[in-house]
Image (spheres, rainbow, N blue to C red):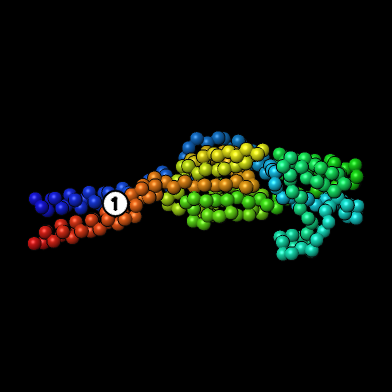
């Protein structure tokens, strides 16, 4: 009778411990089968992605022409380069442009140009059109210098990450942060995004394959990603580490008692 009692207690203790620590496969695996669009739709969305210029973006804009001397007045004053990424391009660095609260930059000779809300390609085209009356076949190179994303929550390396390519996916951002921990909620990743002065919060489920068609698959500059803790982590924090240790100790104690009685 006693043996059955202790066996039952042991089984119950093991079940409690396992149920408190296990995580379902469907909540861990990325890009599981789900509703997807056809191949053409997915390809067109990927190819059409372009970052949109925002207030407080810092831009590098270089104007060139057939005659380099003619283009000099349309570039900001040059200053000696001090270990920036432009070192591979030239021994000098052009000063940057800051998009003001109204979406404008102050461009040499041309004056204020509204670039906020335009894609990078549209901004280049707009500047080229404004330069054509002054320069023959002008060329414009534009880059966002302060493109960065932030990742916090249940990831291995939370932090802010500068992006050189101006094009990054959510999965790539999570990879930079060392991927989600086992306690990260893959069904509910929050993306905080600012657009035209308004902040939005969107939930993304990366366990569903069709999330690659979401407007949040590609990230925008200054996006903030928050990985929520899953139920296992939340329950553990409610129960507390002391209770978990107590369960383990109780399980060991019951097992020892059961074995002792069995061999008496």
On the rendered image, what quadrant is the C terminus found in?
bottom left
Point out residue 102 in the picture as x, y percentages from the top left corner.
74, 40
Residue 58 to residue 130: above or below: below
> Residue placed at 60% from the left, 46% from the top?
223
Point out residue 45 in the picture as x, y percentages from the top left corner.
63, 39
In this view, the residue farthest toward the front is: 101
Point out residue 25 in the picture as x, y percentages from the top left corner.
39, 46
> Residue placed at 30% from the left, 53% from the top?
243
> Residue placed at 52% from the left, 57% from the top?
157
Q: Is residue 165 visible?
A: no
> Residue placed at 66% from the left, 50% from the top?
147
**Relative to residue 209, is residue 84 drawn left or right?**
right
Q: Is residue 166 visible?
A: yes
Nearest to the observer: residue 8 or residue 43: 8
Residue to which mark 1 is pinned: 17
**Relative to residue 191, is residue 196 drawn left or right?**
right
């Amino acid at each position: 009778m006693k043996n059955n009692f202790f066996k039952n207690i042991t089984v119950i203790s093991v079940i409690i411990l396992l149920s408190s620590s296990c995580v379902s496969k469907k909540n861990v695996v990325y890009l599981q089968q789900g509703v997807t669009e056809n191949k053409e739709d997915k390809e067109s969305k990927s190819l059409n992605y372009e970052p949109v210029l925002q207030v407080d973006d810092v831009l590098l804009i270089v104007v060139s022409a057939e005659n380099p001397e003619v283009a000099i007045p349309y570039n900001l004053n040059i200053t000696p380069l001090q270990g920036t990424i432009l070192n591979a391009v030239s021994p000098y660095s052009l000063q940057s442009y800051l998009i003001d609260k109204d979406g404008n930059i102050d461009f040499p000779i041309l004056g204020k140009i509204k670039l906020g809300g335009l894609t990078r390609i549209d901004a280049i085209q707009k500047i080229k059109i404004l330069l054509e009356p002054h320069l023959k076949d002008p060329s414009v190179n534009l880059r966002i210098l302060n493109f960065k994303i932030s990742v916090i929550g249940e990831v291995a390396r939370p932090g802010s990450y500068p992006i050189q390519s101006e094009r990054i996916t959510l999965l790539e951002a999570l990879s930079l942060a060392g991927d989600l921990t086992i306690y990260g909620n893959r069904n509910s990743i929050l993306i905080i995004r600012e657009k035209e002065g308004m902040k939005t919060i969107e939930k993304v489920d990366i366990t569903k394959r069709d999330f690659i068609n979401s407007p949040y698959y590609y990230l925008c500059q200054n996006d903030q990603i928050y990985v929520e803790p899953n139920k296992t982590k939340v329950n553990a924090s409610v129960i507390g580490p002391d209770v978990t240790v107590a369960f383990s100790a109780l399980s060991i104690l019951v097992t020892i008692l059961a074995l002792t009685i069995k061999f008496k």
